[in-house]
């Protein structure tokens, strides 16, 4: 269950980071963030944090699916 939560949060952070970057660059309008260069810097950082979270969640799941050493 933690793996799924990590993956969902990672994807949400990536999407939010991309949106914030586009708003900061003025590509997406309609909010107070539009055209504000602060979000042009913070957006990629947020997206990168989401990517790290997503990769950690995927890695956690891969380690648990493998079978452990066999006992004879």
Image: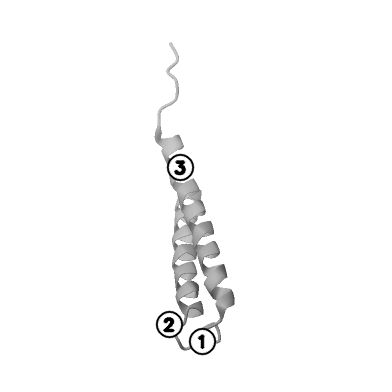
Between discs 3 and 2, the one toward the N terminus: 2
Q: Residues within 10 Å of mark 1 (few under 14, many from 20)?
A: few
Picture quadrant of residue 68: top left
Q: What residue appears at the point 51 percent right and 65 percent down from the top-left corner?
A: 44
Q: What residue appears at the point 44 percent right and 61 percent down from the top-left corner?
A: 11
Which label was assigned to residue 70?
Answer: none
Picture quadrant of residue 64: top left
Q: Which mark is nearer the camera, 3 or 2? A: 2
Between discs 3 and 1, the one toward the N terminus: 1
Q: What residue appears at the point 45 percent right and 53 percent down from the top-left corner?
A: 4
Which label was assigned to residue 59?
Answer: 3
Q: Are marks 2 and 1 in contact (CB under 8 Å)?
A: yes
Q: Residue furthest bottom?
A: 30
Q: Residue furthest right?
A: 38
Secondary element at tag 1? loop
Q: Are marks 3 and 1 in contact (CB under 8 Å)?
A: no
Q: Which mark is nearer the camera, 3 or 1? A: 1
- Residue toward you, 8 or 16: 16
Q: How far from the left and from the top, in percent, is residue 59?
A: 45, 42
Q: How far from the left and from the top, in percent, is residue 63?
A: 45, 36
* Image side of residue 65 versus residue 2, left or right: left
Q: Which residue is mark 2?
A: 28
Separation of residues labelled 3 and 2 (CA atoms): 34 Å
Q: Residues within 10 Å of mark 3 (few under 14, many from 20)?
A: few
Q: How far from the left and from the top, in percent, is residue 39?
A: 55, 74
Q: Is residue 21 above or below residue 58?
A: below
Separation of residues labelled 2 and 1 (CA atoms): 9 Å
Quadrant location of the C terminus in the rendered image: top left
């Amino acid at each position: 269950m933690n793996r799924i939560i990590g993956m969902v949060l990672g994807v949400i952070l990536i999407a939010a980071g991309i949106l914030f970057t586009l708003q900061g660059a003025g590509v997406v309008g309609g909010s107070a963030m539009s055209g504000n260069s602060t979000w042009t810097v913070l957006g990629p950082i947020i997206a990168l944090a989401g990517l790290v979270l997503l990769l950690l969640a995927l890695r956690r799941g891969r380690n648990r699916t493998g079978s452990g050493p066999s006992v004879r």
